[in-house]
């Protein structure tokens, strides 16, 4: 594996909505995974980088955040390190521009290489065609990649991610959950805590929640919507989750398995995770539809929920029988790859692999060029997609 710059390994950053993965090229996992936030006055929870009100606030937060990464976690001289940024193709241009400004002007890094997360994920598998599903915190984004080229016209995105699961969990808990004190008495959660913090909700989802099967989900829906229908299935065990002091939250088994159903419920436009997959594949060239279906790659922290991948395959196979898709698509085989890394940092690993090749020297955007133009090329800007821009790489 080729490493450049006198063995000063480049830094790889994947700044997600909830967590940031950071480390060095040529390594098989990040050095550290930390929340994408800085200390603030938001009730002690800090301020997340993507939750900013203006460019000045974002600039200051990025300076603080990157300073901690360079000097607390990675312990490197940023002026001597190339930077690889793993980003979504749908990353806001404003965030991208401010990030580049902070890196080039404030930290004076020699070069930055922006790489699309959906594409570099395939570097971990050694394939060039796949359908990449990124289940993140804010949303789920899907982009088919054919022969190493992301098909932007076929992308799909919906606000169906970890945040949606946490929102559903909170509503179910406030409606059903009880708090048990040291005296053994139970009171409604809403009387004790009218609102749960993001940290508590995330911890409950990670520790206790799971995705149920499609037949069981239908049983649950039928028992709720039809009084004369079948009786609900036996719920999973109830567990106690410790809160502050001697209080324990009673987590009913039905709450644990129903929280993730928000990902698969169809709205008025018949949109769900399964419909997004089929719609995106239908928007792809017909010759690539079968290869895409046979090369599904599911990444992102939200995809690590137990049972999600199996349920997703069940939903897609079932939805193919719907009149909307029955005459248009017939995917007999659906296969999901297992990247050689945990799903939450599979894209980071792809960036670390790409950064160890000649691409970091030939495709990076240098500080000298940035100081002349004060601009970072963007794929959605036609003026940037020219041979003249390509010649700026250093």
Image (cartoon, rainbow, N blue to C red):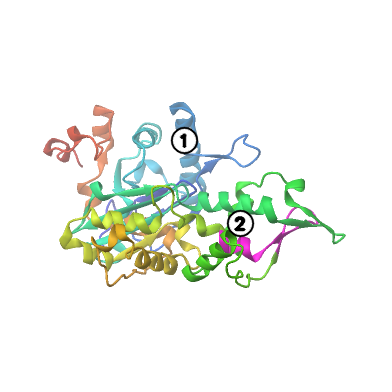
Residue 203: image tag? 2
Label 2 environment density (alpha carbons within 10 Å; few <14, some 14–19, many ≥20) = few
Name the spot of residue 127 as percent of width and height, x first.
Answer: 24, 65
Q: Nearer the viewer, mark 2 or mark 1?
A: 2
**Toward which corner of the image does residue 241 lie, by quadrant?**
bottom right
**Quadrant (top left/top right/bottom left/bottom right) for the C terminus:** top left
Residue 216: image tag? none
For image coordinates 61% across by 62% down, the residue present is 227
Mark 1 secondary-structure assignment? helix
Is 46 situated left or right of 191 in this image?
Answer: left
For image coordinates 53% across by 53% down, the residue present is 165
Q: Is residue 299 visible?
A: yes
Q: Is residue 61 above or below residue 244?
A: above
Q: Is residue 168 above or below residue 389?
A: below
The residue range painted magenta reads 240-258
Residue tagged 1 = 63
| The one of 271 and 299 positioned closer to us in this rendering | 271
Asked whether residue 49 is drawn in magenta, I would say no
Name the spot of residue 310 as percent of width and height, x first.
Answer: 43, 69
């Amino acid at each position: 594996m080729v490493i450049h710059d006198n063995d000063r390994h480049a830094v790889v950053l994947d700044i997600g909505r909830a967590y940031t993965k950071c480390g060095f090229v040529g390594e098989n996992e990040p050095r550290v995974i930390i929340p994408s936030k800085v200390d603030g006055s938001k009730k002690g929870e800090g301020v997340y980088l993507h939750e900013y009100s203006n460019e000045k606030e974002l600039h200051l937060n990025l300076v603080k955040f990157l300073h901690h990464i360079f000097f607390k976690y990675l312990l490197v001289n940023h002026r001597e390190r190339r930077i690889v940024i793993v980003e979504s193709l749908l990353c806001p241009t404003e965030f991208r521009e401010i990030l580049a400004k902070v890196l080039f002007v404030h930290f004076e890094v020699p070069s930055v290489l922006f790489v699309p997360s959906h594409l570099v994920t395939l570097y971990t598998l050694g394939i060039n065609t796949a359908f990449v599903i990124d289940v993140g915190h804010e949303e789920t984004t899907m982009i088919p990649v054919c022969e190493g080229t992301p098909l932007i016209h076929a992308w799909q995105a919906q606000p169906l991610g970890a945040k949606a699961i946490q929102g559903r969990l909170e509503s179910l808990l406030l409606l059903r959950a009880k708090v048990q004190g040291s005296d053994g008495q139970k009171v409604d959660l809403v009387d004790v805590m009218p609102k749960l913090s993001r940290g508590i909700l995330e911890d409950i989802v990670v520790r206790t929640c799971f995705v149920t099967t499609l037949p069981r989900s239908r049983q649950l829906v039928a028992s709720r919507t039809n009084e004369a229908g079948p009786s609900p299935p036996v719920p999973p065990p109830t567990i106690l989750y410790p809160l502050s002091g001697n209080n324990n939250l009673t987590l009913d088994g039905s709450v644990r398995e129903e929280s993730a159903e928000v990902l698969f419920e169809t709205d008025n436009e018949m949109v769900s995770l399964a419909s997004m997959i089929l719609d995106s594949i239908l928007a792809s060239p017909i010759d690539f539809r079968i290869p895409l279906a046979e090369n599904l790659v599911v990444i992102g922290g939200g995809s690590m929920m137990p049972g999600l991948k199996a349920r997703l395959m069940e939903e897609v196979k079932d939805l193919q029988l719907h009149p909307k898709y029955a005459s248009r698509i017939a995917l007999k085989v659906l296969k999901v790859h297992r990247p050689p890394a945990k799903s939450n940092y599979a894209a980071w690993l792809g960036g670390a692999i790409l950064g160890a090749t000649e691409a970091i020297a030939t495709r990076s955007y240098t500080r000298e060029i940035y100081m002349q133009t004060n601009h970072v090329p963007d794929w959605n800007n036609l003026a940037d997609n020219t041979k003249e821009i390509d010649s700026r790489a250093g």
